């Protein structure tokens, strides 16, 4: 059997992988690699034990690899792909790149132990993305928030959080913004008009935030699109979300934020749904230049009223 023969040649790698200590906290990328290995196996119609027999390894090792608990070599990846009859070379190459990045430490790791895993993982998702699209309906997106606006948002958390954690979360959010302000990652923000009217921290905070949006709308690589109240063709009500472009479309990821927690979606059917939602918003939102003028008009309205 071809799959069995290729696994026999890979046995030295299997022994090294078996000897590796299990990761207590696999990163988002490591878990995504594992999820893709599981998807590859399931698409081939294999159970975990079947794939283990084809590879000549312990079934527990399959479970650990698919959970991101243990690493694999690029050679092992290709052995698995061959056993699962995967001919998507673009996907295999992209997964191999994840493996070769092993040992890379992101800036967010310095916050480990002080902020929750959800904070670290959105920073990792954004850092690895080739492009980012966000949609917000009640808040200015975190990647465009001013420091005072972010502080005001965190200060309104319920139950309340300590001042020290508010400062930590704010500093982390501002540091995340370097991903898009550097110009290396294209960023499109769809902002519902409701978010532009919401008050966090009072009129001055809102005024400063509108000024910042007007300025950011002119930054290369950043596109701001407003979805006005009277717009038509909007999708049915949905939660705030972040769509992160992977190195290939098969590795795109969606993070959906709700009042009850965060969900990360990578199944093709879920990702395709959000891709279609973005296409509808692209048709319904004001063009970038009109969006900037729209925000400018709201700022002028505030100035006439409060200043």
Image: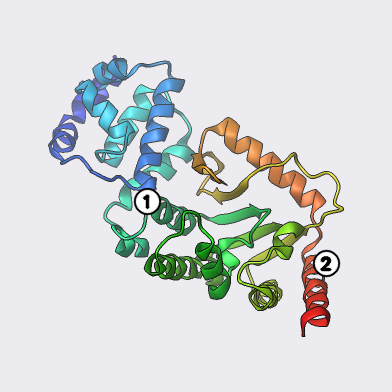
Residue placed most toward the observer, 173 or 276:
173
The residue depicted at 58 percent of the width and 68 percent of the height is: 145
Q: Tag 1: Cα neighbours inside 10 Å, few (<14), some, or many (≥20)?
A: some
Q: How is the image coloured?
A: rainbow
State left or right for residue 45 relative to residue 15. right
The answer to whether residue 58 shows anywhere in this view is yes
Q: Give the quarter of the figure containing the N terminus.
A: top left
Q: Nearer the viewer, residue 112 or 101?
A: 112
Q: Which residue is mark 1?
A: 117
**Against 184, is 17 above or below?**
above
Please identify the quarter of the rendering in which residue 164 is found. Answer: bottom left
Toward the viewer: 287 or 88? 287
Q: Is residue 183 visible?
A: no
261 lies left or right of 120: right
Number of on-image labels: 2
Identify whether 185 is placed above or below 30. Answer: below
Query: Which residue sits at x=76%, y=44%?
Result: 280
Give x and y (percent) for residue 254: 55, 44
Image vertical order of residue 270 relative to residue 117, above or below: above
Image point (82%, 79%), residue name: 305
Identify the residue at image location x=40%, y=68%: 168
The residue identified by callout 2 is 290
**Residue 277's image quarter?**
top right
Q: What is the x, y in percent for residue 55?
A: 25, 22
Q: Point out the tag, 2 or 1, that comes first from the N-terminus.
A: 1
User: SS of the residue at dot 1?
Assistant: helix
Label 2 to label 1: alpha-carbon separation: 38 Å
Residue 140 pos. (x, y %)? 64, 62
């Amino acid at each position: 059997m071809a799959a069995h023969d290729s696994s026999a040649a890979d046995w030295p790698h299997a022994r090294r992988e078996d000897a590796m200590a299990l990761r207590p906290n696999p990163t988002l990328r490591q878990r995504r690699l594992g999820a893709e290995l599981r998807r590859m196996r399931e698409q081939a119609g294999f159970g975990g034990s079947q794939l283990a027999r084809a590879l000549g390894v312990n079934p527990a090792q399959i479970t650990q690899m698919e959970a991101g608990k243990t690493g694999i070599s690029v050679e092992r990846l290709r052995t698995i792909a061959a056993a699962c009859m995967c001919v998507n070379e673009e996907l295999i190459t992209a997964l191999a790149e994840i493996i070769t990045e092993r040992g890379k430490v992101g800036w967010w790791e310095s916050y480990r132990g002080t902020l929750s895993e959800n904070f670290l993982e959105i920073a990792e998702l954004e850092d690895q993305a080739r492009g980012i699209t966000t949609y917000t309906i009640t808040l200015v997106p975190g990647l465009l928030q001013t420091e005072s606006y972010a502080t005001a948002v965190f200060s309104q958390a319920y139950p309340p959080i300590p001042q020290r954690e508010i400062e930590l979360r704010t500093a982390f959010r501002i540091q995340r913004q370097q991903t898009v302000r550097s110009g290396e990652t294209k960023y499109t923000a769809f902002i519902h008009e409701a978010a532009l009217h919401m008050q966090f921290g009072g009129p001055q905070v809102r005024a400063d935030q509108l000024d910042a949006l007007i300025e950011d709308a002119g930054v290369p690589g950043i596109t701001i699109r407003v979805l006005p109240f009277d717009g038509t063709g909007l999708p049915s009500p949905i939660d705030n979300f972040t769509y992160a472009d992977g190195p290939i479309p098969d590795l795109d990821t969606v993070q959906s934020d709700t009042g009850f927690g965060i969900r990360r979606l990578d199944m093709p059917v879920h990702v395709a749904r959000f891709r279609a939602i973005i296409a509808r918003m692209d048709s319904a939102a004001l063009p970038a230049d009109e969006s900037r003028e729209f925000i400018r008009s709201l700022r002028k309205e505030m100035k006439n009223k409060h200043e």
